[in-house]
Image: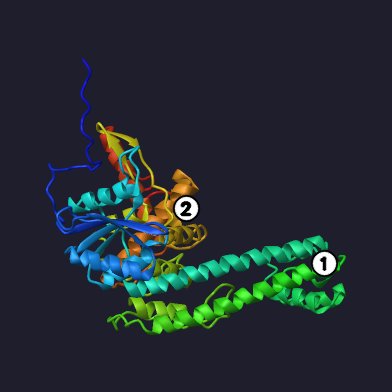
Amino acid sequence: MKKSKQPNRKNRFAMDALQQINLNAAGIDIGAEEIFVAVPSDRDEQSVRSFSTFTVDLHRLADWLQACNIDTVAMESTGVYWIPLYEILEARGIDVNLINARHIKNVSGRKTDVLDCEWIQQLHTYGLLQPSFRPPEHICALRSLVRHREMLIHYRASHIRHMQKALQLMNVQLTNVLSDITGVTGMQIIRAIVSGERDPVVLAKFRNSRCASSEEEIAKSLEGHYKREHLFELKQALNLYDFYGRQMADCDAELEIMYEQFDPADDPTMPAPPRRTRQRRKNQPHFDLAQSLYRMSGVDLTQVDGLDALSVQTILSEIGTDMNPWPTVKHFASWLRIAPNNRITGGKVKSRGTLPTQNRASTAFRVAAQSLARSNSALGAFYRRMRARHGAPKAVTATAHKLARIVYFMLKNKTPYQDPGLHDYEERQRLRTLLTLERKAAKLGFRLEPLQSTSGLVS
């Protein structure tokens, strides 16, 4: 007997067993040229509409949502396409939830833009979507400039390699006698070569007094064949290097103005960081960044070992100064993905370790942790102890976790950082090790006794 065909049903996923939380919710699927929006079926005859990405169409989209009495929306964080719509909807007073695309995967084999926006709308209606963290608007503006400055540094580094290549093509072995050709000695020699000087002895006299190589070694490295085409490449690379340097200076001036517009933190009892008096290092800002960060946050995070002004700027531009979005420090470490992610099935741990991430704040904490390898501080001792037990990668993660906890409590409680010191940390570790040995001995029916009862343990 031939089976009768079932009527075609709409490809919509019903979850009637769950309780609806956001009754006035909409779902938005973002694209480069078209945006699909889904609202509850009882709000309009056409519950799914598409809009273009022009500004006038985005305002028309917002008008339609308000006409449908929508007060909260969920959208995917697709590239940078979501930012204009996010800002327009937020200005209209609509609660906008930015959702990680990995958290809203649709049913396999049923992928269309219409189904995606409907799926987002349903998940958001039942409160099954966790919004991503987005700092306040003034922090977002600061973050944009900080990321732009990092991009300028990356571009300028490319032209340093171009200068090195041009020198190598001329067999000018300047990189063999100078650790950094963009230092004082290297830049003076390169500028003189571009200006027309070819005498190695004359060029070697640009040597800075702090340079490790002698004038004779530098002069020997400068003997090469200065061909015209390679000199032109060197000149072009030098001009581009200087151009991006000027762009960074302009960016620093804009950042300084932006920091001055921040309301100062209300905590006059906190000690301010000392004024910077030493010469500015390469890639360092052209203003006193530590003072600006202190005025912004109310605490001097540069006092934490491993954290300098640039790394603190990166961290604060990503997380802001308000720790309320993270109820506890564990939530903060989990968001940074520097905390273990244990997967437990049937009472057994199937996998553990941190998840991969591109979070810039997490990267800044990890870079700061790596710089503590030779630090004579408690954090440096902790890093070396972890490296000896678990290896360098896990030591970096563990130390970054500790740095993140310190920053969290400093910003939350407005308390200064006090380094307990290397000797105090090692003494506490010695006592902790002794207590562990005593417990193991007592468990096995033994008792620990010092070799010399008057002087304690033999060192």
Query: What is the secondary structure assignment of the residue under circle 1?
Result: helix
Query: What is the secondary structure assignment of the residue under circle 2?
Result: helix
Total marks drawn? 2
Which one is in front, 251 or 192?
251
What residue lies at 32% left-to-right and 53% top-to-bottom?
A: 334
- Residue 384's label in the rendered image is 2
Query: Which residue bears the numbered disc 1?
Result: 229
Place of residue 248 in the rendered image (x, y in percent of width and height, measured from the top left): 55, 76
Q: Is residue 57 above or below residue 257?
A: above
Which one is in front, 288 or 101?
101
Screen quadrant of the N terminus: top left
How crowded pointer 2 is (Cα within 10 Å; few <14, some 14-19, many 20+) is rated as many
How crowded pointer 1 is (Cα within 10 Å; few <14, some 14-19, many 20+) is rated as few
Mark 2 vs mark 1: which is more N-terminal?
A: 1
Place of residue 29 in the rendered image (x, y in percent of width and height, measured from the top left): 33, 55
- Residue 399's label in the rendered image is none
What residue lies at 37% left-to-right and 65% top-to-bottom?
A: 83
Place of residue 297 in the rendered image (x, y in percent of width and height, measured from the top left): 34, 75
Three-letter amino acid code at disc 1?
Answer: Glu
Question: Does 387 sit left or right of 197 as displayed?
Answer: left
User: What is the spatial separation of the Cα atoms under label 2 and label 1, in whole angstroms?
Assistant: 50 Å
